[in-house]
Image (cartoon, rainbow, N blue to C red):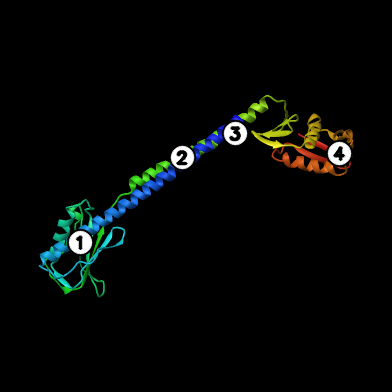
Amino acid sequence: MSYLLLINKSILKIYRILFILLISISFFSCQKEKNNDSVSATTKVTIREAGNQLLLKNQDSTSLILPVLELQSSVYKLEFNQPLTFEPNQLVAAINSSFQKTSLPKNYRVEVLQCRDNEVAYSYEIHTEKERTLIPCAGRLLPNGCYTIEITFLDKVESSSGYIWLLSLLGVGLLIFVIKLILNKKKRKDNIIELENATADFEKLGVFQFYPEQNKLVKAATEISLSKKECEILAIFVANPNQIIKRDELTKRVWEDNGVIVGRSLDTYISKLRKKLKDDDSIKLTNVHGVGYKLEM
C-alpha cells in the first residue's frame, strides 16, 4: 500500500511541475507578445521620424508620410504619399540621427525601391564593425519619383534567448525528473520482487526460479504467472528432472485425485508451459510418443 502511495505522490509531483511549466510558458508568451508589440511600435515611430527628417532636409512641406508597415520580422517599409527627390546622404543622415536616439539594433540595411518596378534605386548597410559598413556614393541626386524605403535589421529587434533558455531548462528538468521517477519505480519494484523471492522457497530451473507456493516463475526479476494446474504439473516435472512422466500419472495426480477426469486438457497445459519456458534453451518439455512427457535439463 505504501508503494502505491509513493507512486501516487510522484505522479502528483509531475502534475504540479507540468502545471508550473504551463503557467510559465503562458506568462512568458504574454510578456514576449507585449514586448514585441512595444518594440514594433517604437521602431515604427523611429522610422517615421527618420522620414520626417528626410522631408525637412529637402524643405518638403507638402509630402505626407504614410503609415510605417512591418513587412515581416525585423523588416519595415517607409512610404510617402507623393513623388519626391533627395540625395542619398540626406537619407543616411536622417536615419542615423533617428536611430541614435533609441536602443534599436545598430546593424541594418536600407533599400530605396522604385514603386513602378520595385527595382533598387539605392541601398547601403550600417554595421557596428566599421569595416563591414557599406555606403556607396551618396552624392548623386535621386530623380523625382515614387520611392519606398525598406529597412531590414540584421540583428533581431528583440532577443528571446532568455525565454528559450528558461523553457529549455524547465523542459530538461522535467524530463530528468520523469526519467528518475521511472528508474526509481523499476528499482523499487525489482527490490520488492527480490525481497519476496528471498523469503520464499523456490526450485532452480535453468535461468528460472520456480515458486510452487506462489504459482509463478521468475526470470531476472520478471514474474511469469502460472495457473494452479500449470504449477501442479511443473512441480511434478521439477521433482523428477530428465525422467519420463507417464500421461496417466500426470492426469491422476493433477485431475483424477480431485475427482475430475479430463481428455486433452493435459496437452493444452503442457503447451502453455512450453511457451513460458521458451526463454531458456537449456530446458525442454518434450513429448515421449505414446508414453508421456519429460523435462530435459
Three-letter code, disc 1: Arg
Give the spatial CA distance, label 3 vs label 4.
45 Å
Three-letter code, disc 4: Gly
Whichever of callouts 2 and 4 sits on the residue coming sooner in the sequence is 2
Quadrant position of residue 196: top right
Of all residues, the one furthest to the top in this rendering is 199
Looking at the image, do the residues carrying marks 2 and 4 touch, with CB atoms under 8 Å apart? no
Image vertical order of residue 236 relative to residue 50, above or below: above
The residue sitting at 36% across, 50% down in the picture is 30
Whichever of callouts 1 and 3 sits on the residue coming sooner in the sequence is 3
Three-letter code, disc 2: Ile
- On the image, numbered disc 3 is attached to which residue? 4
- On the image, numbered disc 4 is attached to which residue? 292
Whichever of callouts 2 and 1 sits on the residue coming sooner in the sequence is 2
In the rendering, which numbered label is found on residue 17? 2
Asked whether the viewer can see residue 218, the reply is: yes
Q: Position of residue 261 (x, y in %)?
A: 89, 39
- On the image, numbered disc 1 is attached to which residue? 48
